[in-house]
Image: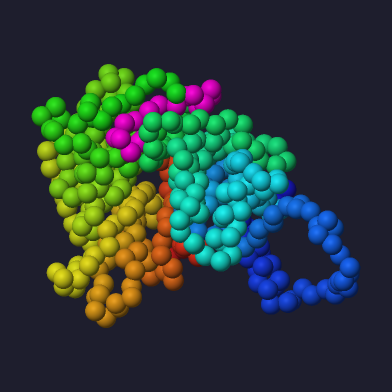
């Protein structure tokens, strides 16, 4: 059996996009003799086919065992790409007219002619795929949508399908987290609460972490929506909860109490554990990075701004995502983040405040990569499929608004 590699998966996507280009340029031409006497009843809807790069992508996920890449879009579709021949375009079922989904028809129009605003734009946002979480080596994954639904998909059959759906009626979902090999999935909401879902039954367990329990009793301000969830690499009973206001709470799942609380001075964008489980790094709206020790909650052990602002008047892009990963080339870990750079608004008046830079720091070495399109999300690929939190990483997949880039972390340079 031919070994499936990450490169072959990318080649599969590349060939799909190339096929569209050939069709547009007329590389594959064929002659058709039209019948001038055809009537309306001679036509009937059969199927909508898609190819090429997904339109308006929103999220990215990777299954490290079966080497499957998933890309979610704002219109609610999901693209699954694996070994040659494994390429699926999925959409959750919805209301339809004459067999065609109304949401799908709206997204098709937007993909062809661009966004039109109004009802179509609102529908697109509600159907957007916010996150995709794979159940490693189980042939299933969970998609999180903008209409507060969790869909459990199975791709064990010839055609992937939804096997269960869980809908939240009173709270909008913001972030979900599924630890490796865990039976529990953690769901954060816009109200600041965290719910626990039992994966086997795909139902709420009844365990809820209310926002007022996660914050200090003396605090009167709402901590904001939940934007980050992750368990400690050394203790799966400790859940790290990040709120957009800057509050970070280390919650003890067994005692149902807050073990430690960390308060940043600026709004929180992202959090990533160090693989030793004793510290973590947080990124913020002012383009700073703060390192915290789990035993010293009072203040961060260090605060840095990796990219110096040219002028205090120049706008700066927040560090929207940060990852702190182990690397086998030495003892120095890898620090990867997107954003954090300033730009001269006068020199580039039409520049949109979206990040197009990817920064990789290891020890004293800093590499800054400028992408052709704005970055949506990036994902680190583990060298070993098992125990991804404790292994080395071989590559980074960067999802752009109109492209997909793979960065080699193993080869020198």
User: Where is 368 relative to 263, above or below?
Assistant: below
On the image, the x and y values in percent for residue 257 come to 24, 23
On the image, the x and y values in percent for residue 359 come to 33, 62
Residue beneath the point at 56% across and 66% down: 113
Name the residue nearer the viewer: 328 or 218. 218
On the image, the x and y values in percent for residue 318 come to 27, 58
Name the residue nearer the viewer: 111 or 215. 111
Indicate the quadrant where residue 177 lies.
top left
- Viewer can see residue 408: no
User: Where is 114 relative to 135, above or below?
Assistant: below
Residue beneath the point at 74% across and 76% down: 27
Indicate the quadrant where residue 153 lies.
top right
User: Where is 215 relative to 374, above or below?
Assistant: above
User: Magenta segment, which residues?
Assistant: 188-203
> Is 366 left, or right, of 108 in this rendering?
left
- Viewer can see residue 101: yes
Residue beneath the point at 30% across and 35% down: 191
User: Where is 108 relative to 173, above or below?
Assistant: below
Residue beneath the point at 25% across and 75% down: 345
Q: How is the image coloured?
A: rainbow
- The quarter of the rendered structure image containing the C terminus is bottom left
Magenta stretch containing residue 201, yes or no? Answer: yes
Total number of numbered labels?
0
Name the residue nearer the viewer: 255 or 328. 255
Indicate the quadrant where residue 245 lies.
top left
Magenta stretch containing residue 14, yes or no? Answer: no
């Amino acid at each position: 059996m031919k070994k499936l590699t990450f490169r072959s998966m990318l080649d599969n996507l590349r060939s799909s996009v190339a096929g569209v280009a050939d069709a547009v340029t007329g590389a594959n031409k064929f002659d058709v003799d039209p019948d001038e006497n055809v009537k309306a009843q001679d036509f009937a809807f059969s199927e909508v086919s898609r190819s090429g790069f997904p339109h308006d992508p929103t999220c990215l996920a990777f299954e490290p065992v079966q080497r499957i890449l998933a890309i979610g879009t704002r219109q609610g579709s999901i693209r699954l790409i694996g070994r040659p021949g494994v390429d699926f375009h999925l959409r959750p079922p919805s209301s339809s007219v004459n067999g065609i989904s109304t949401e799908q028809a709206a997204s098709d129009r937007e993909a062809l002619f661009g966004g039109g605003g109004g009802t179509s734009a609102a529908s697109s946002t509600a159907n957007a795929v916010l996150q995709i979480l794979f159940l490693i080596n189980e042939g299933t994954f969970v998609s999180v949508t903008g209409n507060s639904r969790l869909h459990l998909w199975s791709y064990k059959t010839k055609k992937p399908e939804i096997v269960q759906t869980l809908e939240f009626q009173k709270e909008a979902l913001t972030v979900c987290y599924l630890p490796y090999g865990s039976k529990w999935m953690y769901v954060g909401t816009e109200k600041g609460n965290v719910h626990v879902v039992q994966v086997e039954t795909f139902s709420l367990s009844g365990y809820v972490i209310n926002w007022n329990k996660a914050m200090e009793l003396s605090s009167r301000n709402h901590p904001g929506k939940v934007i980050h969830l992750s368990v400690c690499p050394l203790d799966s009973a400790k859940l790290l909860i990040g709120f957009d206001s800057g509050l970070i709470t280390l919650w003890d799942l067994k005692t149902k109490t807050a073990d430690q609380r960390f308060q940043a001075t600026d709004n929180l964008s992202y959090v990533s554990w160090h693989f030793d489980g004793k510290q973590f790094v947080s990124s913020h709206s002012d383009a700073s990075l703060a390192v915290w020790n789990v035993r010293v909650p009072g203040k961060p052990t260090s605060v840095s701004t990796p990219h110096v602002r040219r002028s205090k008047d120049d706008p700066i892009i927040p560090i929207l995502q940060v990852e702190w990963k182990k690397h086998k080339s030495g003892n120095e870990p890898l620090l990867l983040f997107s954003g954090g750079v300033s730009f001269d608004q006068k020199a580039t008046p039409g520049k949109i405040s979206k990040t197009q830079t990817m920064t990789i720091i290891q020890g004293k070495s800093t590499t800054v990569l400028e992408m052709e399109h704005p970055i949506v999300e990036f994902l680190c690929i583990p060298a070993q499929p098992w125990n991804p939190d404790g292994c080395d990483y071989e590559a980074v997949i960067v999802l752009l608004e109109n492209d997909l880039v793979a960065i080699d972390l193993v080869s020198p340079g």
